[in-house]
Image (cartoon, rainbow, N blue to C red):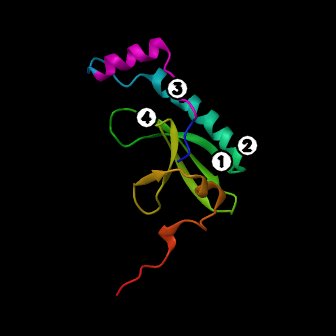
């Protein structure tokens, strides 16, 4: 799974705001959303330089689906084999997940997703029945 080597620590004032949010005393802190948007954009630049992916359009902030006010970066990329995918930032893992097509699910982002190399991926082998 592709994740940052080290997680970025929240600045103290943001961590304090998140403590209040977890206790139910405030809305989702905008500083927390901005912090993760910045970290996500830096990670997206790293994926571009390290894996040669192409970003299509401008990454946008979208609701993460938990109805807690969190918004995360979502970007459409093209991998080395020309396959388009939608990546969505996960603040807990500080990494991108690949949005599944056709439903709301997502899976972890692996190097094979970016390189298009599925030669050692057994999930694409046909099922054998007896």
* C-alpha distance separating marks 2 and 1: 17 Å
Task: Point out which mark residue 34 bears.
Answer: 3
* C-alpha distance separating marks 3 and 2: 23 Å
The residue indicated by pointer 1 is 57
Please state which of the two labelled residues, at mark 1 or mark 3, is closer to the viewer. 3
The answer to which of marks 3 and 2 sits earlier in the sequence is 3
Q: Is label 3 in a helix, a strand or a loop? A: helix
Q: Give the overall secondary structure of the magenta segment.
A: helix
Residue 117 painted magenta: no
The answer to which of marks 2 and 1 sits earlier in the sequence is 2
Residue positioned 60% across, 42% down in the render: 59
Please state which of the two labelled residues, at mark 2 or mark 1, is closer to the viewer. 2
- Residue span colored magenta: 5-22
Number of marks present in the image shown? 4
The residue furthest bottom is 130
The residue indicated by pointer 2 is 49
């Amino acid at each position: 799974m592709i994740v940052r080597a080290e997680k970025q620590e929240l600045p103290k004032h943001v961590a304090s705001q998140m403590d209040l949010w977890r206790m139910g005393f405030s809305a989702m802190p905008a500083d927390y959303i901005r912090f993760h948007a910045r970290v996500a954009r830096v990670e997206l630049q790293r994926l571009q330089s390290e894996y040669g992916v192409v970003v299509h359009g401008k990454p946008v902030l979208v609701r993460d689906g938990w109805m807690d006010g969190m918004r995360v970066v979502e970007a459409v990329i093209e991998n080395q084999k020309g396959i388009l995918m939608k990546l969505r930032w996960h603040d807990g893992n500080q990494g991108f997940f690949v949005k599944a097509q056709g439903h709301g699910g997502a899976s972890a982002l692996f190097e094979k997703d970016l390189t298009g190399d599925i030669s050692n991926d057994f999930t694409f082998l046909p099922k054998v029945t007896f």
